[in-house]
Each structure stands twice: as structure tokens, then as C-alpha cells.
Image (spheres, grey):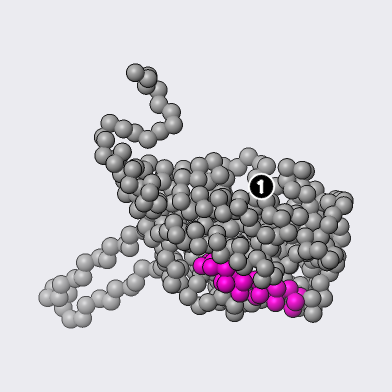
Amino acid sequence: MAGTAPRTASDHAAPHGNDEQAPRPEAASPPLQPGLFDPCSVRQVTLRNRVVVSPMLSYCAEGGHPNDFHLIHYGKLACGGAGLVFVESTKVDPRGCSTPHDLGLWKDDYIEPWRRITRFIKSQGAIPGIQLSHSGRKARRAVPWQGGGPLREWTSVEPGQAWQIIGPSAIAHGAGYSVPHALTQSEIEQCLRDWEHAARRALCAGFEAIEIHGAHGYLIHQFLSPRANLRSDAYGASLAGRMRFAIEVAASVRRSWPADKPLFFRISAVDNAGWTLDDSTVLARELGRAGVDVIDCSSGGMGEESVTNTARPYGYQVGYARHIREQAGVMTMAVGLIAHADQADGIIRAGDADLVALGRELLHNPNWPLDAAHKLGLRKYDHIPKASAYYLEKRAANPAFTPSTWRRGLRQP
């Protein structure tokens, strides 16, 4: 398996003949686990390190189009030294927009604006990735800083099209939400084509990795959920039935996505609404067979409570990544309150995950990879632009200088 996928120790055969005459082989040393700043190859794409920018909605698009904000936002994260920069949740269907300001990839008009951004990310040594999504019954809401609730009045993101709410079953997400239209078989087939076509556009736009968003209560998660999916046909009624849509989406995307490029899949490993870690393990195995390379292990989203509004310990989801990596035999990415250099490096070195994704910590400090490398004792600057590396290397030659934003006891001369 590509990268540092789980491995088991090899059995060593005993030597033939007399043990006293034949030398015993030395015990094999366990393979060294990589660190945070070691490269990682997934299929034929190599990341310069294992720091990933987690997809984070910014709600700054107009009509689904990326703009200068996105160029600066994702550009500075690439300059900061991350190995893989995932663009936020980008919708495959205008009906799937969470808000009027989501990004889209449901038509070819979006390809050229994205090319400008992916070119710049690549020029800074990072890999550009994109998360593809559909919000399903959680669509048509206000942006978070305007309450985030269901919109009472709206204009469709795509002019001339109704902003219809859809889902696996006619069950609203919660109080105040619209009851979704339950998708028919032919409509599900059209949804699958939407994902496939969006993947083709992502390739044309210059992206090198795709993540399918199957978590946080959105459309794929709704099909997985025994709470949201009460279908009695082949897309419901059992765990295998509820997993079918997720697996078919993965297979549809893989058909349009080159065999040498990685495919990620974000899951809610648990959701406190009937979906369990054992279910996620079964799903991860099946997704691997469908062409998924990395499982991004998040949680929650099926209920009204947001995990980001609740006090959680550092790395509270890392155990999910470790479990699925060990039990499903797939590469995993850990995410969720990973903020410190030694914490992130420890996750990789312990074999808990192959990659770590940071979100809000990178909003706080876009140069987190640079800072983390320094704190881990790495004085190389080959993961940031040369225009910055040159001067930082010169400054690092001064043994009396310690980079910091705060240090007691210093006074201006």
C-alpha cells in the first residue's frame, strides 16, 4: 500500500539443519515510523510533509465562483509550508449548497478561476486538493455569523433553478428545517453523475487530490444514517444498503479521477445517532475496495449540536483514525484539535495516522508548519518559499536568537 499504510511483522523461518552449526538470524528491527516532516506518497503523488490543511468553509464565494479571497487564503497556507492544501467543501450540485456563498464545481465555468489558484499552490511546493460535497437536507441555510439557521427567503445559487432540498428520506434535519424530497432511483443515478462530472472538472482545474465529504450530517452521511435513511429499497434497510450510496459515489469519482492520483473520504467515525465505529470500519474496508486511499476520520454532525461548540480534549478524534487504520488496513488522516508540534509529530510516529489535518490552528497561524518544524528541532527551510527561506536561514545562524512572539526580560536598547 502507498505511503505508510499499516503493516504486520514478517514471520522468520527457522534455519534448516543443526541449530548449533547454523547461525541464528538476528531479530529484525521494527520499521521506523516516519515523522511529521517526512514525505508521504499516496499513489503517485508525494507530499513534502504530513501536514494537511483541513477543508474549512469560508463562505466567501458568489454564485459558486472562487475569487481573490480564495487565492490569498489558500495561497498563504501553501506558502506556510503545508504538504497538502485542501480547498473547502465545494458543491457538485447547486441544490447541495449549505449557504448562498458556497463554492461550486457543477459547471465548467468554474474551471479556469480554479486553475489560477491551483497553479499558485503548486508553485509553492504544496499539493492542491479539493473536497467535493453535497449538503442534502442540511442545505439552504444562512452563513454561521448570521445564525446559520434555515433560510426563510432565498434566491438560488444557480439563477433560474429552484433550490430544492433533497435527502434519502422525507425526514427534516431538525426543528425549522424543510422536509427534503426523497430521492428516486433515477435521481440517485443523476447525483452519482454529478459527482463524477465534478471530479473531471477538478482534474481540469489542476487539483492533485480529491476528498469526498461523507461526514457531518451531509448527503452521504444521511444515506449512511439509520436516523436519516428509512428507505426500504437497495439504498436502505440494512447497513449494506445504507452504505451503497457512499460506495457508489466513491466508485463514480474514481472513474473520472486518474489512477495515479489520491482519493480521500471524510467520515464521521461516530455520530451519536446510530452510526458506530464498527460501522465505520466496515465502510472503510469497502471504500478501499472502491478506490479510496485515505480515510479522514472526523465525527458528529447528524444532530443539532456542533462538535466545534463543545469543549473537547486535544486530539479527541485520533483514536478513530488509529482504530480504522489498524482494523480496516487503510491509510488514515487524524483531525480535531491538533494544535501542537509534538502532538502532531507524536500521532505520526505512534502509527495512529498517516497524515494529520489542521484547521483553525492554521487560521490562527498560517505558518504553523514552519513554526512546528523549528520546535521539533528541524532547522531546514526547504518546505517554505525560497524568498522566505533564504532570510530565515541567515537569521538561524545566530545562536543567540530564538524566534518568538513573546519573551520575558527583553528590553529595547
* Left or right of 140 in this view: 92: left
| Other residues around mark 1 within 10 Å, as few (<14) / some (14–19) / many (≥20) | some
* Left or right of 257 in this view: 90: right
Between residues 53 and 124, which one lies in front from this camera angle?
124
The amino acid type, in three-letter code, at marker 1 is Val
Label 1's element?
A: helix
Residue at point 84% right, 66% down?
Answer: 160
* Left or right of 137 in this view: 84: left
Residue at point 34% right, 18% down?
Answer: 413
Does 17 lie within the magenta span?
A: no
Which percent across, then down, holds residue 325?
50, 63
Q: Which residues are magenta?
A: 188-212
Between residues 305 and 164, which one lies in front from this camera angle?
164
Query: Is there any visible trace of residue 218 in the rendered image?
Result: no
Q: How many marks?
A: 1
Residue at point 37% right, 41% down?
Answer: 375
The answer to whether residue 409 is above or below residue 384 is above
The answer to whether residue 330 is above or below residue 126 is below
Between residues 342 and 96, which one lies in front from this camera angle?
96
Which percent across, then down, holds residue 205?
57, 68
Picture quarter containing residue 140?
bottom right
The answer to whether residue 374 is above or below residue 43 is above
Which percent across, then down, holds residue 113?
61, 62
Picture quarter containing residue 50?
bottom left
- Dominant secondary structure (helix, strand or loop) of the stretch shown in magenta: helix
Does 209 lie within the magenta span?
A: yes
Picture quarter containing residue 185?
bottom right
Which percent across, then down, holds residue 339?
50, 44
- Label 1 sits on residue: 307
